[in-house]
């Protein structure tokens, strides 16, 4: 009997979700979207003015050692489920063999680090690539959200309002970087926020703070005194999937052409 009741509840929740998603398409955006705009600050803090900032991150691939401390710190800081398929940030290992063969692995998102594997073949080279939400200037995720739960704050960070998210997963499907997941408990979309709760308190994201090689450089995108601006002047910078024209604010130094 209990199982029948649970199945009935699940069916009702499912049909409610379908109804809300479909219904929102035909309603005026002013009635379905949350009452805010990208020009507003998502936090009300007298010590933080979003208009004074435009945040970004650069990752130096040559410095990443695949220790996984960033992915682990992210899970602890943001209460990300420990299951191996929920990540706000993760690390991939690229192994390049002859004739253009590329093998990519990311055991448990790199949380436990990477171990040397005994193989008959040795790659010509290998390197690690941390990944996360790219906080695009032209984000596909915000365009498909039927209720405006996913939005770009005035300081350039892509955020999700959990109170408005209906868990339709449209944004998860639209993200070309695979950087979102549906939380198994709240049933809302989750992703990297640059640890926004830390930014407004003048702290760096947790992944940046714990990196032992300073492979992640975080800061202002436009202020000349920013370490991020200085780093961009000194290094050759690239972005993931540039052909999509999403204009990511997560940049990469020494980006290899094999990285996807």
Image (cartoon, rainbow, N blue to C red):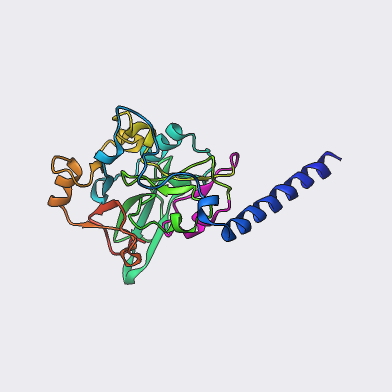
In the image, 38 versus 203, the foreground residue is 38
Please indicate whether residue 96 sits to the left or right of residue 189 in the image.
Answer: left
Q: Is residue 178 magenta?
A: yes
State the residue at coordinates (69%, 50%).
16
In the image, 115 versus 105, the foreground residue is 105
Whole-percent x, y for residue 237 in the image: 21, 56
State the residue at coordinates (35%, 46%).
39
Give the extent of the magenta segment.
168-186
- Asked if one can make out residue 122 in the rendered structure from this viewpoint, the answer is no
Please indicate whether residue 103 sits to the left or right of residue 164 in the image.
Answer: left
Could you tell me which quadrant the N terminus lies in? top right
The image shows residue 112, relative to residue 198, as above or below, that is below
Kindly give the residue lying farthest to the bottom in the view shown. Answer: 99
Could you tell me which quadrant the C terminus lies in? bottom left
- Tally of numbered discs: 0
Whole-percent x, y for residue 235 in the image: 16, 53
State the residue at coordinates (83%, 44%).
4
- Asked if one can make out residue 240 in the rendered structure from this viewpoint, the answer is yes
The image shows residue 241, relative to residue 135, as above or below, that is below
Whole-percent x, y for residue 74 in the image: 41, 37
Magenta-drawn stretch, dominant element (helix, strand or loop)? loop
State the residue at coordinates (36%, 45%).
153
In the image, 215 versus 145, the foreground residue is 145
Whole-percent x, y for residue 163 in the image: 54, 40
Residue 183 is drawn in which quadrant? top right
């Amino acid at each position: 009997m209990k199982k029948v009741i649970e199945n009935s509840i699940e069916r009702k929740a499912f049909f409610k979700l379908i109804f809300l998603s479909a219904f929102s398409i035909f309603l005026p955006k002013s009635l379905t979207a949350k009452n805010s705009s990208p020009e507003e600050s998502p936090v009300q803090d007298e010590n933080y003015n979003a208009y004074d900032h435009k945040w970004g991150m650069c990752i130096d691939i040559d410095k990443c050692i695949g220790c996984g401390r960033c992915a682990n710190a992210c899970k602890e800081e943001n209460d990300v489920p420990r299951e191996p398929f929920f990540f706000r940030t993760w690390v991939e290992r690229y192994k390049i063999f002859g004739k253009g063969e590329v093998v990519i692995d990311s055991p448990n998102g790199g949380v436990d680090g990477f171990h040397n594997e005994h193989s008959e073949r040795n790659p010509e080279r290998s390197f690690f690539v941390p990944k996360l939400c790219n906080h695009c200037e032209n984000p596909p995720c915000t365009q498909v959200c039927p209720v405006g739960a996913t939005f770009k704050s005035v300081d350039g960070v892509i955020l999700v309002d959990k109170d408005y998210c209906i868990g339709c997963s449209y944004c998860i499907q639209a993200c070309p970087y695979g950087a979102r997941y549906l939380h198994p408990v709240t049933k809302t979309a989750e992703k990297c926020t640059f640890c926004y709760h830390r930014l407004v308190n003048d702290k760096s994201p947790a992944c940046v703070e714990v990196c032992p090689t300073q492979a992640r450089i975080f800061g202002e995108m436009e202020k000349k005194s920013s370490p991020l601006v200085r780093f961009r002047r000194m290094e050759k910078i690239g972005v993931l999937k540039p052909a999509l024209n999403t204009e990511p604010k997560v940049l990469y130094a020494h980006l290899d052409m094999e990285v996807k």
